[in-house]
DNA sequence: TTTAGGG
DNA sequence: CCCTAAA
């Protein structure tokens, strides 16, 4: 308080104050802010106002007697107390001090005061706007939150707390703010104005500026200012709120003198003001009404009067605000908000909270003009606050405004505790908003989504091809985080259908796909070959199965599923196939690259980079079943690459871990199933053995063998011999006969 | 579901 | 490659 007075002196008119105060504010900011009320005398000198003074000023003439004017007062008092407590922190004392007394007597005087106040406020607002602009430009960071006020447990307190520790979360305090900016101050400003507004007088006289006589709000130093708030809240929602808030309330008051100091419990004062409104007698209300609208009213309904008055104020304020540079500021704010990202936006919390509170209040209390749309409210945010304060004394608008803002900040960032009520509400909202928003943003916007989207897109492409291989298969194993095109994506999107299975896939779909891809020529060929080979032997079996058809369907379905899963569509990155040449190389690389290391899938195999031909290679044969059904048989020759990949996979994961290998290395390949891998491996083992005993059976090796480079076969043998292949049962047969490989367990 | 095996 | 049994 004391300081305040000093500050007050400095301050004088809002404008002047601003100038002087800034520095002070800055310093103060660190502390938290406090609002001070200053009493401005006619001569322009400023005195720090005590709560009582403030109160009195707000209510009636300064020092005049205060009579407890309002019956409501009692209620109000209680409320106030609460609020006061909140604020108390800084001013704790004040609380006690405040009694609501309204000097009815000096309405005229009050009016003058109010006018003066309003003027002052206007000036402040103007200034604030200016500052904001600067700030906006300068600040990005905003972060920090300083907070603010501790005093009260309530919101303010929070701010203070912020400083202590919590505020960390919100952001780091920006030195900037402290130093240069006042953001906090702005908030404070808000507070004051609001409060003032809330107080009866404020509203009307916007336009007229006169030297403020009465109390002036001082700036709080709260650090919380936007900056802090911003930092604290990042949520988009918060942004909005923030923006809104900032525009008005925030007016950061600036620094003005107030900063200097001491924190007065502005709040308390505000409360008083508010209280005053609420507490005002009908007569007083009439006065206010008259002053506000310039006409008298016969209406005796207090509620109505209050509403009208508050509305009038709001309008006025709006006008003023608008007139001032607010719009600019607002625009800036919006821009800011838009940025959203600024994670930092700690501020939001406070602001938002305010907004939220306001809105809530509005909703709750009919007092405010509900008519106004939310936006409107926001715009007039300040005004409303004032009005609210006005209207509702109980809830204590003050809290809202300030507390809200501050508290919010604090709460949001730091303490949740601040105000019980307001806080809660506010808090909750704010916090929620902020967090939520953040969360949402962060989350949703999450990379995942993004990636997914990418994935989807990719998937879109995929369809046709089977991109079978790429290294990054990803997902399943979680191999490459980067590549997470998880199949999920695929799944999710309907694309899978579209995609259908890759040509490769075994399912029935293949044909379609294949048809698309395969050259007409190929297809036939494939078919024929397929037919020749197997049809006969299998036909019987097939026949066996009555279900052939059904089965086919099943397969298809399965295939589809697989695809859905595996296909990653994606990955444009995917290597897709480079073709044989590539294959070789790839193979080499793969081998080199993939050391046997652990089983870690991720590390392990790269997804295949399969060769390009993949699809084309596949041969699909339709085999008629005995039943008359048809079965498709697919023949897709293994490429060297695939083999290499398989080998690596085995090396990494061990034999028998087909599913794992599949995921790791073949996830992208729709057509190679774990079973396929297993089969292939078996074949490789055989081949490798054959290699060893070349002569044994004569020359005839299977040619496929030839296709497989000796080194690879060697490696296969090597792997086969390794104990680890099959995890547990290494012992089992390892050496046994023919295949060195362990084969099976069980 | 996955794996091992037989065909 | 397919198909099935076992787990």
Image: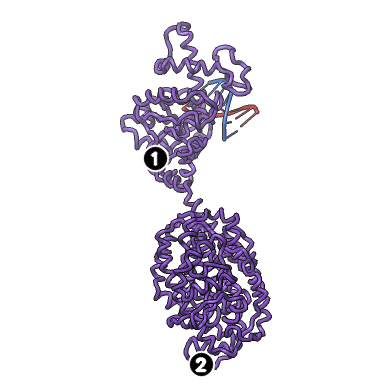
Chain colours: A purple, B blue, C red
Q: Nearer the viewer, residue A137 or A361?
A: A137
Q: Residue at x 59, y 12 (%)?
A: A736
What is the distance, in whole Å, between disc 1 and disc 2 at their CAs? 76 Å
Q: Where is residue A401 shown, x and y percent of the image?
A: 55, 71
Q: Is residue A165 above or below residue A106?
A: above
Q: Where is residue A670 shown, x and y percent of the image?
A: 45, 34
Which quadrant of the structure image shows residue A261? bottom right
User: Can I make out residue A687 in this image?
Assistant: no
Q: Where is residue B1 shown, x and y percent of the image?
A: 57, 35
Q: Residue at x 47, y 12 (%)?
A: A690
Q: Secondary structure under badge 1?
A: helix
Q: Which residue is mark 2?
A: A296
Q: Which mark is residue A462?
A: 1
Q: Secondary structure under badge 2?
A: loop
Q: Nearer the viewer, residue A47 or A644?
A: A47
Q: Is residue A401 left or right of residue A133?
A: right
Q: Where is residue A302 shown, x and y percent of the image?
A: 59, 86
Location of the N terminus of chain A (image quadrant): bottom right
Q: Nearer the viewer, residue A601 or A97?
A: A97
- Is the residue at mark 1 from the same chain as the one at mark 2? yes
Q: Residue at x 43, y 77 (%)?
A: A320
Q: Which mark is residue A508?
A: none
User: Can I make out residue A479 in this image?
Assistant: yes
Nearer the observer, disc 1 or disc 2? 2
Location of the C terminus of chain A (image quadrant): top right
């Amino acid at each position: 308080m004391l300081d305040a007075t000093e500050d007050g002196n400095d301050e004088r008119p809002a404008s002047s104050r601003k100038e002087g105060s800034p520095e002070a504010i800055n310093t103060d900011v660190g502390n938290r802010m406090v609002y001070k009320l200053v009493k401005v005398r006619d001569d322009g000198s400023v005195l720090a106002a005590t709560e009582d003074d403030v109160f009195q000023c707000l209510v009636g003439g300064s020092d005049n007697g205060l009579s407890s004017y309002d019956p409501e007062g009692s209620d109000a008092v209680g409320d106030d107390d609460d609020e006061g407590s909140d604020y108390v922190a800084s001013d704790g004392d004040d609380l006690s001090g405040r009694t609501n007394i309204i000097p009815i007597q000096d309405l005229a005087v009050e009016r003058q005061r109010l006018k003066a106040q309003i003027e002052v406020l206007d000036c402040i607002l103007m200034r604030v706007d200016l500052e904001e602009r600067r700030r906006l430009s300068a600040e990005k960071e905003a972060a920090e939150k300083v907070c603010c006020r501790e005093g009260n447990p309530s919101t303010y307190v929070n701010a203070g707390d912020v400083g202590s520790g919590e505020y960390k979360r919100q952001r780091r305090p920006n030195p900037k703010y402290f130093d240069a900016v006042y953001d906090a101050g702005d908030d404070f400003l808000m507070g004051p104005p609001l409060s003032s507004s809330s107080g009866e007088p404020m509203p009307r006289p916007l336009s007229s500026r006169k030297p403020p006589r009465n109390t002036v709000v001082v700036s709080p130093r709260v650090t919380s200012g936007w900056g802090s708030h911003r930092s604290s809240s990042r949520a988009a929602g918060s942004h909005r709120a923030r923006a809104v808030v900032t525009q008005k309330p925030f007016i950061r008051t600036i620094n003005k003198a107030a900063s200097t100091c001491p924190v007065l419990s502005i709040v308390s004062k505000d409360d008083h003001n508010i209280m005053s409104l609420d507490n005002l007698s009908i007569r007083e209300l009439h006065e206010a009404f008259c002053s506000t609208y310039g006409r008298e009213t016969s209406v005796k309904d207090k509620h109505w009067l209050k509403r009208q008055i508050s509305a009038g104020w709001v309008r006025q304020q709006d006008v003023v605000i608008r007139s001032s540079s607010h719009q600019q500021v607002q625009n800036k704010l919006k821009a800011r908000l838009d940025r959203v990202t600024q994670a930092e936006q700690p501020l939001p919390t406070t602001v938002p909270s305010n907004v939220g509170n306001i809105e809530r209040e509005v909703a709750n209390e009919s007092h405010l003009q509900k008519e106004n749309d939310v936006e409107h409210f926001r715009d007039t945010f300040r005004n409303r606050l004032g009005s609210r304060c006005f209207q509702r004394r109980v809830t204590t608008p003050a809290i809202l405004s300030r507390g809200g803002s501050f508290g919010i900040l604090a709460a949001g960032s730091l303490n949740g505790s601040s105000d019980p009520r307001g806080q809660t509400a506010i808090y909750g909202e704010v916090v929620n908003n902020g967090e939520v928003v953040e969360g949402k943003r962060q989350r949703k916007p999450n990379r995942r989504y993004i990636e997914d989207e990418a994935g989807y897109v990719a998937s879109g492409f995929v369809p046709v091809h089977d991109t079978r291989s790429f290294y990054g298969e990803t997902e399943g194993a979680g191999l490459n985080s980067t590549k997470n095109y998880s199949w999920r994506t695929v799944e999710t999107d309907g694309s899978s259908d579209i995609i259908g299975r890759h040509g490769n896939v075994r399912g029935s779909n293949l044909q379609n796909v294949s048809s698309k891809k395969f050259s007409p020529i190929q297809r036939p060929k494939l078919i024929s070959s397929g037919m020749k080979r197997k049809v006969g032997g299998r036909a019987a079996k097939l026949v066996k199965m009555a279900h052939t058809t059904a089965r086919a369907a099943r397969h298809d379905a399965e295939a589809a599923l697989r695809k859905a899963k595996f296909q990653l569509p994606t990955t444009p990155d995917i290597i897709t196939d480079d073709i044989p040449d590539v294959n070789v190389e790839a193979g080499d690389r793969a081998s080199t690259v993939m050391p046997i290391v652990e089983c870690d899938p991720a590390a392990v195999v790269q997804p295949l980079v399969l060769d390009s031909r993949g699809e084309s290679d596949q041969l699909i044969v339709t085999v008629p079943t005995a039943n008359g059904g048809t079965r498709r048989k697919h023949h897709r020759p293994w490429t060297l690459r695939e083999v290499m990949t398989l080998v690596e996979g085995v090396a990494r994961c061990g034999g028998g871990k087909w599913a794992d290998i599949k995921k790791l290395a073949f996830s992208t390949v729709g057509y190679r199933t774990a079973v396929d891998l297993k089969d292939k491996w078996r074949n490789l083992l055989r081949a490798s053995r054959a290699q060893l005993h070349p002569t044994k059976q004569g020359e005839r090796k299977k040619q496929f063998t030839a296709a497989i480079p000796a080194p690879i076969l060697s490696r296969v043998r090597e792997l086969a011999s390794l104990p680890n292949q099959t995890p547990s049962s290494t012992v089992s047969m390892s050496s046994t006969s023919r295949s060195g490989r362990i084969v099976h367990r069980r």
